[in-house]
Amino acid sequence: MVISHHITFLVNSVCHTWGQKPWKTKDLSKNNWLIGLLAFGEGWHNNHHAFEFSARHGLEWWQIDQTWYVVKLLEYVGLATDVKVPTLIQKQRMSST
């Protein structure tokens, strides 16, 4: 339980300090791959801040997001509906490149 709590707390402290910022947001959120792995996808924090409505935080194929895999399974068996992810147009609008 101690490890779980520390990883949860790391999301906000680490992911607002170190990492990459691929999306134009008005905050200091960053994607951090290590926290992404340890916190089941929550480390893709800039993705989360850019698209807070999205059920998927790991938006790239290489961004491992274990929580998203669970959501997809729940959707497949009919227990999750109206699952939202950002569209290509929304991504283009928020892109920092």
Image (cartoon, grey):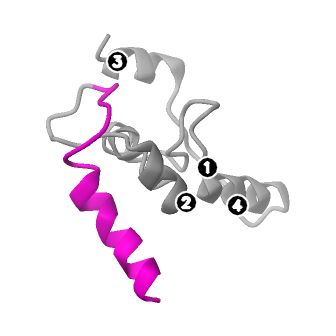
Residue 71, percent across and down?
A: 67, 58
- Residue sitting at x 33%, y 60%: 11
| Local crowd size for mark 3, using a 10 Å CA cut-off: few (<14), some (14–19), many (≥20) | some
The amino acid type found where label 1 is placed reads Val
Q: Which residue is mark 1?
A: 83
Q: Which residue is mark 4?
A: 70
Does the residue at mark 4 contact the one at mark 3 (Cβ under 8 Å)? no
Q: CA distance from mark 4 to mark 3?
A: 27 Å
Q: Which residue is mark 3?
A: 95
The amino acid type found where label 2 is placed reads Phe
Q: CA distance from mark 1 to mark 3?
A: 22 Å
Q: CA distance from mark 2 to mark 4?
A: 10 Å
Instruction: Give the side of residue 28 with respect to residue 23, left or right.
Output: left
- Magenta range: 1-23
Residue 46, percent across and down?
A: 33, 40
Q: Name the image quarter holding the C terminus.
A: top left
The amino acid type found where label 4 is placed reads Val
Q: Which residue is mark 2?
A: 40
Q: CA distance from mark 2 to mark 3?
A: 24 Å
Q: Is tag 1's residue or tag 2's residue first in the polypeptide sequence?
A: 2
